[in-house]
Image (cartoon, rainbow, N blue to C red):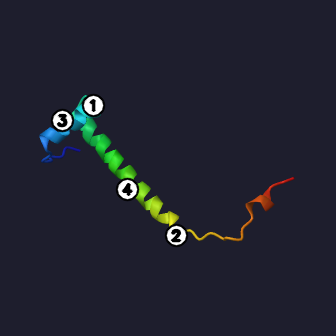
Amino acid sequence: MATNLAIDDKLLEEARIVGKHATKKAVVNEALAEYIQRRKQAEIIKLFHSVEYDQNYDYKKQRQK
């Protein structure tokens, strides 16, 4: 899909060099993949605060002797 974007050329070139990418397209694709990954991670982290733990649960009791 062809898309026209107004992206800062200096930022794009710096990202290309730092990321050792051959093309601008590769830079944009990786940046989008990282963006998606970070957003998904943020959603998962929010779940950590929604889990209720039983303070009386004895995990050692489950072990076989």
The residue depicted at 23 percent of the width and 31 percent of the height is 17
In the rendering, at what x and y percent does residue 14 appear? Answer: 20, 36
Say if mark 3 contacts mark 1, CB within 8 Å. Answer: no
In the rendering, at what x and y percent does residue 6 appear? Answer: 12, 47
Q: Residue furthest right?
A: 65
Which residue is tagged 4?
Answer: 39
Which residue is tagged 1?
Answer: 21
Q: Quadrant of residue 53?
A: bottom right
The residue depicted at 29 percent of the width and 34 percent of the height is 19
Disc 4 secondary structure class = helix
Give the residue type at disc 1.
His
Name the N-terminal-most of marks 2 and 4. Answer: 4
Say if mark 1 contacts mark 2, CB within 8 Å. Answer: no
The residue depicted at 15 percent of the width and 45 percent of the height is 7
Quadrant containing the N terminus is: top left
Name the N-terminal-most of marks 3 and 4. Answer: 3
Near mark 1 (Cα within 10 A), the count class, few <14, some 14-19 or many ≥20, is: some
Tell me the number on the disc at residue 13.
3
Which residue is tagged 2?
Answer: 50
Give the residue type at disc 4.
Arg
Give the residue type at disc 3.
Glu
